[in-house]
């Protein structure tokens, strides 16, 4: 009799465990569904407010205007400084307009102004001025690299944001060798670099 009682107790306890396991699995499934719904709602809210949506450190925005050769302003008001490059100054109130600065600004404007761009992070989120630091793509053009390759910018890498430093250095070397842009003979009466 005692054995029968123990057997019934073990079976009841076992079935209770199975029932609890099923309930836990259902709860996990419900939690996953809710998490997906929250993520979807958050993305809808971000789209309507213009906040950034990141997916593996990639963001897509529309450019409101080009500030200069290596800086843009997005429609949501954020300012983006291109990582790894530097163009001659045109808007710094402490400096005169530098050689080839207007050309670099004009080319950047032509490339990105009013267009949707993809922004990719490296390590740092912002610089000391609060500008987003990003690699910029428009269509299939890697804008940072394009500006260096065509002599509108020089390499300016600041660790830890050096993911494409070697690529930019090679692009600058080729631009110099081929005398493109600011590296062309007689492009500047006084050397920028």
Image (spheres, helix red, strand yellow):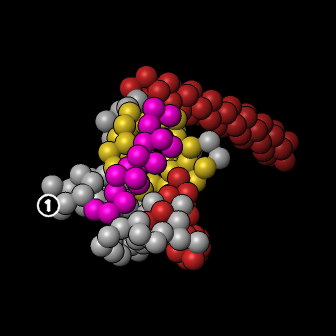
Quick one: 164 or 48, which is closer to the camera? 164
Q: Quadrant of the C terminus?
A: bottom left
Q: Secondary structure at mark 1?
A: loop
Q: Position of residue 113 (x, y in %)?
A: 44, 37
Q: Position of residue 188 (x, y in %)?
A: 36, 67
Can residue 186 be seen in this snapshot? yes
Q: Which residues are magenta?
A: 98-115
Task: Judge left or right: residue 89 versus residue 108.
Answer: left
Residue at left offset 41%, top offset 66%: 187
Instruction: Name the residue beneath numbered marker 1.
Output: 94
Residue at left offset 38%, top offset 49%: 105
Residue at left offset 77%, top offset 42%: 14
Task: Judge left or right: residue 109 versus residue 94.
Answer: right
- Give the class, few, some or many, for how many residues have Cα within 10 Å of label 1's Cα (few <14, many ≥20): few
Residue 100 lies in the magenta-colored region: yes
Residue at left offset 55%, top offset 48%: 137
Q: Quadrant of the N terminus?
A: top right
Quick one: 49 or 78, which is closer to the camera? 78
């Amino acid at each position: 009799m005692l054995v029968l009682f123990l057997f019934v107790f073990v079976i009841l306890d076992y079935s209770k465990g199975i029932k609890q396991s099923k309930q836990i699995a259902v709860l996990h499934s419900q939690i996953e569904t809710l998490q997906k719904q929250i993520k979807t709602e958050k993305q809808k809210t971000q789209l309507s407010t213009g906040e950034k949506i990141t997916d593996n450190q990639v963001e897509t925005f529309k450019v409101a205007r080009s500030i200069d050769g290596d800086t843009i302003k997005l429609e949501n008001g954020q300012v983006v400084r291109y990582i790894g490059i530097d163009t001659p100054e045109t808007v710094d109130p402490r400096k005169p307009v530098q050689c080839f600065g207007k050309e670099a600004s004009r080319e950047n404007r032509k490339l990105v102004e009013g267009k949707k761009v993809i922004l990719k992070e490296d390590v740092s989120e912002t610089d000391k001025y609060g500008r987003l630091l990003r690699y910029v793509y428009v269509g299939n053009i890697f804008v940072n690299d394009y500006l260096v390759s065509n002599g509108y910018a020089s390499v300016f890498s600041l660790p830890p944001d050096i993911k494409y430093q070697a690529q930019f250095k090679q692009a600058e070397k080729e631009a110099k060798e081929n005398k493109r842009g600011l590296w062309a003979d007689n492009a500047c009466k006084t050397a920028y670099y």
